[in-house]
Image (cartoon, coloured by chain):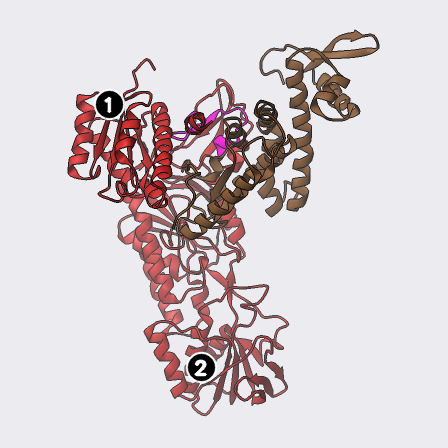
Chain colours: A red, B brown
Amino acid sequence: MAEEIRIGVFVCNCGSNIAGYLDVKSLAEYAKSLPNVVLVKENLYTCSENGINEIKAAIKEQGLNRVVVASCTPRTHEPLFRGTCAEGGLNPYLFEMVNIRDQCSWVHMQEKEKGTGKARDLIRMGVAKAALLEPQEPIESEMDPRALVIGGGIAGMTAALALGNRGYEVTLIEKADQLGGLLLKLDKLAPSGADGCETVRKQADLVSRHPNIHLMTSTHLDEVNGYIGHFQVSATTNGAKTQFGIGVIVVATGANVFRPAGLYGYDGSKVITQLELEEVFKSGPFAAKNVVMIQCVGARNDERKYCSRICCMVAIKNAIEIKEKSPETGVRVLYRDIQAYGTENEALFQHARELGVIFIKYDPARPPKVEEGKVVVHHELLGREIDLDQDLVVLSTPLVAGDDNEAISKLLRVSLDANKFFLEGHVKLKPLDFATDGIYLCGNAHYPASVREAVSQALGAAARASIPLSKGVMSVEPIVSTLVDEDACRGCGLCVALCPYGALEIVRGEKGRKVKVIPVACKGCGVCAATCYHHALSVNSYSDAQIGEQIRAYLEESA
Amino acid sequence: MQYTTDVRIIRLMCTGRVDPTMVAEAFMEGADGIMVVGCHFGDCHYISGNYQAKVKIGLASKALGYVGLNTGRVVFNQCSSAEGDRFVSQVTAFHDSICAIGPLGSAENLSLPALKDRVDTARTALASEKLRWVVGKFTEFEKSGNKYGEKFTAHEMWRTLDTIVIDEIATHGILKEMGKGAASVVELARRLEIAPPEALKYVLALQRRGLVGLAGVDGSTPSYKIVERPARAA
C-alpha cells in the first residue's frame, strides 16, 4: 500500500464531438489540480494510434500506475483502453473511464459552461475512484468437456448429434421410454410433407448408434449442482441412481399441447384437437364431409395471453391434407389472425385457399358456437351470423409449457417467463443461452416452434455450447464478488440464497462456516455485497470504498 | 436528447449492488436527491438484481422518511439501455421534483447537521441484520412463498418491513443517544420524539439483550447506559 499513486488523465476532444461543446482546455487544466494526478494530456482522439501510443509511453516514462481517460463511453472503448494499459505494462483493471461525451457534450449541447462544470465533477469522481482501484487477474478454470442434453425430442436429439459429431461426449436424458417427443404423434410435417414418425425414427437411430452419445431413457433428473465447466448431475433410471459430471447443459424439454376440456364441446371424437386429427390421418381413410377448424382455442385470452405461433400453420397444413385425402370435404377455418410468416408458409396458405379451404375471421368477443351438426359464427363482413355444416370440429390449441419446467428451472437455477416457458438470457443478443453461463436452450422449451425452427435452434444451441467445451480452460472477467473480510463472515447464507447464479456456497473450514465465491460462476452483480450486513463481501472494481469515494468526490466540491 | 446538467451518474454493474446504506451515506455527503435506474423486470442480464434493488431502495426511502427526510428525494426507476428518451424524461421529472422540494434540509425544516445526524441513525438501521433478511426474502416470499409454501402479498411484506424499520430506528437511535452518555427513558423519548412508554419498551428490550444496563437512579428516575461488551457477542 506504500506505493505512490501516479494517475495519468487523458482528456479527449473526440474531434468536435466533445471539444465543440465543452471547454476541454480548462478540463485538462483542472485535472492537473486533482490529487495523485501526475500527468494530464489532451488528445484530438485518444483512441487514435497517436493517443494510444501516448498512453503507453506515459505509463513507461512517467511511471503511471493508474490511467483515467475522459472521453466517449465504456460501451465501445473500455476494452480498447484496458488493452492499451496492458500493452503498456499496466494491469488493465487500473484503468478508469469517464464519459464526458455521452454524459456531457452530447446531452448538454447548449450549456457549455454548466456542461464543462459537470465534466469537471465527473473527472474528479473518476480520479478519486481510480486511486482506489486494485489490479485484477483473469479468472481461469478447467472445463469438463462433456455435455448434458435434457429432452429427447427433435430439438434435443439434434443438439446431441451436433455435439457428438463434434467429438464431445454427450449424455442425453429423456423422461419417456423412447426418443421422439411430440413428433411421434404428428402425421406429416409442413412444408416438405415428410412423415413425422419417420423423421424421428431416423434421428433416434443416429442417436442410439452414436459412439459419443450416452442415451438414458425413462430417466428423471434429480439434482444439478455446480457451474459452467463443473456441473454434477444425479439422475434416476427405473429406480437406479447415477451420478456424473459434465461441463455444459442444453435444455430441450419441449412443451405440451393444451387439452381444451370444456371448450367448444370438446369430446375427443366429434370435436377434437389438431393433434388428434393427425392421429385420424394416420389411422386410415378420411371420412368427414364437413370440417370446421377453430383457431386460438385457449390462446390469446386472459389466462394465456400469448400466441402459440405454430397453430395457424398446423391448421393450414392439416386443411391441405384433408383436401388431398378427400377433395369433396369442405374445410372452413375460423381464425382471429393468420400467422403464416415465411415464404413457404405464406405459399401454403395461398395453396390451401386454391384448394377451396375457406378462411373466416371471427371476433373473440363473439366466438363461434358449436351446435349439433353445425357451427354458428358471426361473419364480420356480412354482419350477421352464418351456419356452417359440420360433422367434425377441429380445435387449434396452443402449446403450453411442460409440466416439469418449474422443477427443472429450480434445479438449474434458470428463469421462466410469465407463461412458464424457459427464458433466454437476452431476447436479441443471447436467444439460445440462459443468463447463467454454460446452460443453453432450444425448441419448444423456449417457445412454440416449428420443427424447422426447433432444429435450427438446436444446432445453434449446440454451437453455443461447444464454445466453452472447445476451450479447455475458461477465462472470466475478474469483476466478481470476493470475500474481502473472512473474519466478518458468519456463514449465515443470506447471500447464497440471493445469488442469482449459484456462485456462492457455504463451506466449513478452520474458522467455521464461511462463504466461498465461485468466481467462474459469478457475474459481479453485487447483490451479495449489497446484502451482507457485515460487509464481508465486495465486488472487484465496485467496492463500497470505491463507490463511496466517487460520491464523496462529487459532493465535497459542491457542498 | 438533452437533459439537466445537475445530475452525476455513477456506473454500477447492476442496481442490485446498491446497498441501502449507500443511499443514506450519499445524503450524509449532501446529495439533494438519488435516483437509482435499473432494468425492466424480466429483462435484466443479472436476472433478479433489479427486484432486490426495488425493495432496497423502497426500504431506504421508508427509513429515511421515518427520520424526517422528504421521501421524494429517493426514487427507483426502470429503463432499458435502448430507451434514451425514457431516461431523459425520468431524469427531467426527478430534477423537477427535486427543484420543487428544494435543497437538502429546506423541505425537512432541519439544519443540515441535525438532518445528517438523523440520516445516520437510519443508516445504522438499514445495515441491520433483520431488515436485510426480510428485504432479501421479499421477492421469494411474494412469488413462491416461504419454506411452508405460504405466500405474502407485497402489502404484507411492506407492513412487516415497516414495523422492523420503526423498531430498528428507535433501537439504534437509543443506542446512539446513550453513546453520548447515560440517559433516562423520558429524556431519550424527548430526544427521539417518541412516546415515553415506547422508549421504555425499546430500552427494556435492549436491557434483555444485555446491550444496555442501569447507570444509576436520580431520585425516582432510573437512567441507562450502554454495556461495554466483547466484540461480536450478540
Badge 1 marks a residue whose secondary structure is: loop
Q: Secondary structure at mark 2?
A: helix
Q: B222 or A201, which is in the foreground?
A: B222
Q: Is residue A192 visible?
A: no
Position above or below: A525 against B172? below
Residue designated by label 2: A319
Q: Is residue A419 above or below residue A237?
A: below
- Indicate which disc, 1 or 2, sits on the residue closer to the N terminus: 1
Chain letter for the residue marked with disc 1 in the picture: A
Residue type at mark 2 is Ala
| Above or below, comparing residue A319 to residue A229 in the picture | below
The type of residue carrying mark 1 is Leu
Frontmost residue, A131 versus A91: A131
* Tag nearer the camera, 1 or 2: 1
Residue on which disc 1 sits: A64
Disc 1 from disc 2: Cα separation: 74 Å
The residue that appears at 42% across and 46% down in the rendered structure is B3
Q: Position of residue A398 (x, y in %)?
A: 51, 68
> Which residue is at 67% across, 36% downward?
B162
Residue range in magenta is A528-548
Left or right of A67: which side holds A331? Answer: right
User: Along the horizontal axis of the image, is A152 left or right of B231?
Assistant: left
In this view, the residue farthest toward the right is B220
Height in image: B121 above or below A418? above
| Residue A474 in the image, given as x and y percentages of width and height | 31, 37
Chain at numbered mark 2: A
Viewer-proximal residue among A423 and B126: B126
Q: Please provide percent x and percent y for residue B122.
A: 60, 28
